[in-house]
Amino acid sequence: MTLFYALIALGSLALIFGLILGYAAVKYRVESNPIVDQVDAILPQTQCGQCGYPGCRPYAEAIANGDEINKCPPGGEATVKKLADLMGVEAKPLAGGEEAEPVKTVAYIREDECIGCTKCIQACPVDAIVGATRQMHTVIDDECTGCDLCVEPCPVDCIDMLPVEQTKQTWKWQLDAIAVKQID
Amino acid sequence: MDSLVEQIERGTLWQFPGGVHPPEQKSLSNQHPIARLPLPSKIVLPLKQHIGANGQLLVNKGDKVLKGQALTKPSANWSLPIHAPTSGEVLDITPAPSAHPSALPELSIIMAPDGEDSWCELHPVADLSSLTHAQLIDILHNAGIAGMGGAGFPTYIKADSHQPIEYLIVNGVECEPYITADDLLMQTHAKEIVQGIEVMQHLLKPQRIIVGIEDNKPQAIAAMKQACEHNDAILVRAIPTKYPSGGEKQLIRVLTSKEVPSGGIPADIGVLVQNVGTLFAVSEAIYKGKPLIERVVTVTGNTIHKAQNVWALIGTEIKHLLDCQGFTPVPEQRVVMGGPMMGFTLPTVRIPVVKTTNCILAPDNQELAQPGDEKACIRCSACADACPQTLLPQQLQWFAKAKDFDKLEQYNLFDCIECGACSYVCPSEIPLVQYYRVAKAEIREQKLDQIKAERAKERFEARKERLERDQQERQNRHKRSSAKAVKPDAEKAKVADALERVKQKQGDKSAVQAAIERAKAKKAADGSIEPDNSEVAQERAKRKEQARLYKEQKQSAQDTEQTADDKKDAVAAAIARAKAKKAAQQAEKATPDEQPNTDDAKPEPRKAAVAAAIARAKAKKAAQQAEETPSDTAAEPAQAQTDEQSDPRKAAVAAAIARAKAKKAAQQAEETPSDTTAEPTQVQTDEQSDPRKAAVAAAIARAKAKKAAKQAEERPSDTAAEPAQAQTDEQSDPRKAAVAAAIARAKAKKAAQQAEETPSDTAAEPAQVQTDEQSDPRKAAVAAAIARAKAKKAAKQEEENAQDADSTAAPAEQPKPADNNDTSENAPLTPEQKRQAAIKAAVAKAKAKKQAKEQEGNDPS
């Protein structure tokens, strides 16, 4: 008989807690998958598609679903490291053997060779190229992510990817090369 | 406990943590008065010499400027103008090495002084109270005054502080070794500095003004005390010599005990600090109207013969300063801009003095040793003791080496004032400050990247949305238009019915004609070996007519969709068709089959219809003349499938011309059953051509084709028809394509004309010019022409096979230069291009004619 009471007591307790938990699960539900946002924030947002996904967000979703974290050449090793930290996995070298420190580039259209075909405009994922049919096109430097996507469609190969020019703002002290110079 | 103000008034001073006592070395340069330098031969003025943005250029290369004339105009926020430091000519405006450790080139104005040093007109202010606050700020702004102590913060912004200022602190500390510029300035121009202080007092209305001067400058202290005796609000305080008490935050701490919050500015705690040099410039700007064009620079070091302070024009090259003061370089000579603690070694001495240059130090190797090799950190914590900002330099160093930027920020790296005290005391000679500078630059860069990534993401998403919306709209449009197409106008339908009836009647007539034709054909067959295919032709003619009828109906239905004046269109179309019918009646045994197939969404239907009609009429006329010949030449269905943005009218005209030519060619091919075999040449062209060049190339191609045709005399020529399917898409220029195709066809025809008395077993090369979206149709045409030329050549070789097949020789008609329309159609070309194209066409035509004449001569029949 004691056993019976004990079972009733435990059973009712289990029921009460179950209800509380069930209610809490509905009431304090977490809507989105925040890991996707976190991954997306780490990715460099070049939208270059070199990872095989159409843009950074789709790759972020893929990573959240277990894809490899080393498919982002524009991000370089730094991005892989951050993603490894976030996802709790081992950092790997970049797939495809790209150099660890990617050189930042920006597209440049040799304007006298441009025939105004608009193909690069259609290819640009961030609308950083302006121009119209049969008009010369040009790149808005500040908006260009250096994704290379405009280079391939260009029928006259008039697009170059130039390394971003160093300015006083982006210049860094060279620790090992503090100039010692012979003055004339 | 006294209040803070009372304590300050009583002369209480506070201590800041850390600090070091490096050898002062000031006596090298403070023993001599400030010298004036001879005018340099060249002035280099970087547009940006301070924190903030560039101004906009006001001068051009070659302009003559006067001393004090503004060379740039302040534009966006935080931008300051620069002024000509002497009169002269602007030689160039070009990037030149900047006064920065990297010496990265920066846009600079290069000036050549004319030696006259003549001032522009100045506007001194006699009485401060006569001007409003805004006017005074404006004067400071336009005088280009930036903080002359270090960072070069625009003074007008500081002077226009919106936060209440309790204490104005005048920084005459000059704590860095070697530098004596402020010391000498205070000694000699105390009165002007005090005037400058009073301007700031007028603008900011602080409770107290405290002048802080290190106690190693007794003469300056005395001069300043004397100069501000008349003003009770100004307190002159001698503070203990310790590096870096001249740091803004340290000086505030020493004089007021207040601490600037991390990441904040002094104005947040009601304090504002101004350098004495800046205040001197303020007084010059207000009371003399002079902009900031020169400053005191200490030129010192053991390698300088006459170490002293000099008035240097902004923009003077460092080399000029060194040369004037007697510079004897030693091996591995370094020249440092700024002091030994915070300055940087110049990569070149061809760098100009800027608004923030306070010292040029040219030490020999004894007084400022080359940094030794970095050794391992021994965790002695001397750096932490020396740090005036109470940071943990040692920890920061580890994190900087590990590039752990989050940790660096957590340890307040950005509170580091880069004073160099930690590096100075480090027994392992670790260049700590350099590590921090690199780390700071990297963190800043990362933040910029982050912002950029954010923006890229936004733009990417905006674009995606836009593309989706566009697609949606396109789909909707399709739906709408197909819905419209279903219900044609009742009136239209009636008209169409009427047309149909008319046609049927005509069909009867054509049956009669067909009978006649058959009879004739039989007659002809008696005397010849021709196959009688007239019946077949007849059948075909009927079918074609039906097809045309159907198409016309369809077209008119389409027309109604989009045009308001569809009635008119219908009338025009009807007239055109009527004409065509008439022409067809007269056409014996010949059935033209052209179907201008324009599927365009927004055509100008009326005009297109008229043009098409004219074309058809011509074709009919041509067919009439082709007597007694079952000409089966299937002409050229020019399917100009033009899209939305194309100009259907012109395309149609061009196609029509082409067809007309084909007909003419067919006429001349008399008594010969021409069974055309088509060689479709698919010319897939791509884009990118200079139109002029293309024209030239086209001309060459045509010339070749002619030559080939010439050689094919008295031989079966294989003509001919080339249905040029110019499938042009959205962005293509259909007009040009059509014109080019037409030219090409015309030439092929000409070739065919010359092939007389031969069963023409033709030929034809439907040049399917599939141009894609952005292709250049002209190139396609050129390619087509080349292809045709080749076809001709091939045909040549078939000569002897077919030579037996000649019967009654018809007079060789002079090949008409049928392409008289060619060039005139080239509307989009520039006149020059047109002219060239015309010349080429003319040459080509002339050749063709000549060749045709020769043929006539050769052929006695």
Image: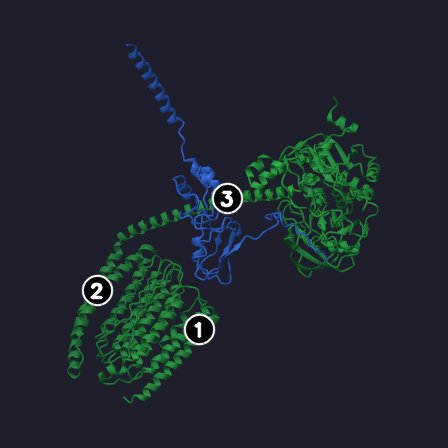
Chain colours: A blue, B green
Residue B368 showing in the rendered view: yes
Query: Helix, strand, or loop for circle 1?
Result: helix
Q: Which mark is residue B822?
A: none
Q: Which residue is mark 3?
A: A78
Q: Position of residue B701 (x, y in %)?
A: 39, 74
Question: Type of residue at label 3?
Answer: Ala
Q: Is residue A173 left or right of residue B745?
A: right
Earlier in the chain: of badge 1 and badge 2, it is: 2
Q: Which residue sits furthest top?
A: A1
Disc number lying in front (3 or 1): 3
Q: Which residue is mark 1?
A: B696
Instruction: Answer yes or no: are tags 3 and 1 on the same subunit.
Output: no
Q: Is residue B819 left or right of residue B374?
A: left
Q: Callout 3: 10 Å neighbours few (<14), some, many (20+)?
A: some
Residue B123 showing in the rendered view: no
Q: Quadrant of residue B432?
A: top right
